[in-house]
Image (tube, rainbow, N blue to C red):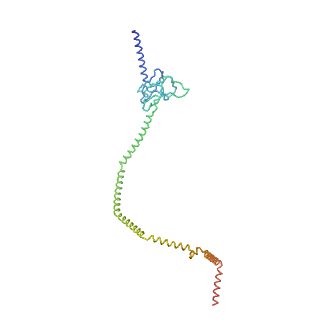
Amino acid sequence: MKSYREIKVAVLAIVCLFLLFFGFNFLKGVNIFTPISSYTGYFEQLGGLTEQAPVYIRGYKVGQVDRIQYDFSKQQAFLVSASVNSDIHLTQGSEMVLVSDGLLGGKAIEIVIPVGDSLSIIARGSELPTRVEEGLMESLQSQLLAHVDSVVIHIDTLLASVQSQLEGDHIKRTLQNVDHITTDLKVSSTDLKQLTHQRLPQVVDSVQQAVSNANRVLTSVADADLKGTIARIDTVAEQVSTVITSREGTLGKLLYDKTLYNHIDSAIVSADNLLIDLKANPKRYVHFSVFGNKEKKKKK
């Protein structure tokens, strides 16, 4: 019975130690049931990389950082050991890249494997070439610092320009010009006040006189016998219309009697023919007038 109890205690202790070891490694992210392969790489700076940091291949987690050793007497002071699943075979040209893990500034290891069927597989535990990839925060920080530098340069230039202006007499001359302008404005304001006090009453009197004259004209027009004048104009218009439309008067006969129109038209035609013949045969009429005068003299 005593040996049986000791065996039970020993088995229980072994199980507890196993569970403790398994739980501790599980909390560290190590799966003790999965075989792993380890690779190393040297870095000049880590940027916050810690042990148990994830190891990725094309964004997929395949392992973790097991150990970080340092020797600050060397340029590449940090030796990083990263474990990956043993079913992953790294080929010649693979490299270990220090990358940003998320927006909070964490770091992780990305293993870049070149693509190609003719590449040979490297041995486990080999040392990989390393490089550091700038993350989003680092990129933004560098761009922001560049902009800050340019802004500082512009501010320095502006301050130097302001200082040169203050040291010179530009501001003094500007203030003097402003003083002269203010003095001119005061003189102009005084002249305008005097002109307003002297000329404005005369202008107001002239306007009042013009308004008074206009009122008198309007009063005269209102007092005039417009209705009688319009009535007389209507009477004259009716008489003119009666004269024009009457057939008995001279104007009516001239307008409506075709015989008178024909006589006048024939007389105009005869006079026109006479003028034409006079222009064509002027001697005929001269001879007639000369001989006519001679006969009159003989009769006397």
Q: Is 22 in front, or is 75? A: 22
| Rendered-image quadrant of the N terminus | top left
**295 is higher (above) or lower (below) than 205:** below
On-image quarter of the C terminus: bottom right
Q: Is residue 160 left or right of residue 62?
A: left
Question: What residue occupies the far bottom of the structure in this picture?
Answer: 300
Vertical placement of residue 281 versus 57, above or below = below
Q: Is residue 227 above or below residue 59?
A: below
Is residue 281 or residue 96 the one in the foreground? Answer: 281
In which quadrant of the rendered view does residue 272 lie? Answer: bottom right
Q: Considering only vertical position in the picture, is 92 above or below 171?
A: above
* 117 and 273: which is toward the camera: 273
Nearer the observer, 286 or 134: 286
Q: Quadrant of residue 45?
A: top left
Instruction: Classify residue 130 as left or right of residue 156.
Output: right
Res 25 quadrant in image: top left
Q: Position of residue 113 (x, y in %)?
A: 51, 28
Q: Position of residue 212 (x, y in %)?
A: 38, 67
Question: Number of labelled discs?
Answer: 0
Residue 94 screen position, x and y as percent: 50, 27
Task: Tell me residue 135's x, y (percent).
Answer: 45, 33
